[in-house]
């Protein structure tokens, strides 16, 4: 099976609804997801996003910080979760 690499930079560059700081954070997450997806030879889609989230982010024994500046909500992790699990084609 041939799995093609998705260019997330182009998608993020065209999106005006996020700050540069959030854009950098989403790019980090999307590159992490893309590497996972290719390593496991998964087609781009919701199932790959769910597998990534469970295997890499919500993995047992891997404690997570809130990843947010003090007093700001939602946390970066919750933003990433919404982006990955709802936005992937």
Image (cartoon, helix red, strand yellow):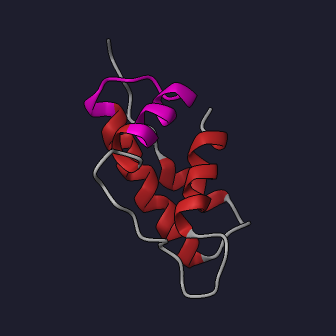
Instruction: Give the residue at the far top of this rendering.
Output: 1
Would you say residue 10 sits in the magenta stretch? no
Dividing the picture into quadrants, the one containing residue 39 is top left
As drawn, 13 above or below 36:
below
Q: Main secondary structure of the magenta part?
A: helix
- Please state the extent of the stretch shown in magenta in the rendering: 38-54
Residue that appears at 49% across and 29% down: 44
In-front residue for pair 7/18: 18
Residue 26 picture location, percent across and down: 51, 61
In-front residue for pair 40/13: 40
Residue that appears at 57% across and 71% down: 22
Instruction: Give the residue at the far bottom of this rendering.
Output: 70
Would you say residue 40 sits in the magenta stretch? yes
In this picture, residue 74 sits left or right of residue 10:
right
Residue that appears at 33% across and 17% down: 2
Residue that appears at 60% across and 38% down: 88
Residue 79 picture location, percent across and down: 61, 60
Indicate the quadrant containing the C terminus: top left, top right, bottom left or bottom right.
top right
Dividing the picture into quadrants, the one containing residue 15 is bottom right
In this picture, residue 73 sits left or right of residue 54:
right
Residue 74 picture location, percent across and down: 66, 70
Indicate the quadrant containing the N terminus: top left, top right, bottom left or bottom right.
top left
Q: How many marks?
A: 0
Instruction: Give the residue at the far front of this rendering.
Output: 61
């Amino acid at each position: 099976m041939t799995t093609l690499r998705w260019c997330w930079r182009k998608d993020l560059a065209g999106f005006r609804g996020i700050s540069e700081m959030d854009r950098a954070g989403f790019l980090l997450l999307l590159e992490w997801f893309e590497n996972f997806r290719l390593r496991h030879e998964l087609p781009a889609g919701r199932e790959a996003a769910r597998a990534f989230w469970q295997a890499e982010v919500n993995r047992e024994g891997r404690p997570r910080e809130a990843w947010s500046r003090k007093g700001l909500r939602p946390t970066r992790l919750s933003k990433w979760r919404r982006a990955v699990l709802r936005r992937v084609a």
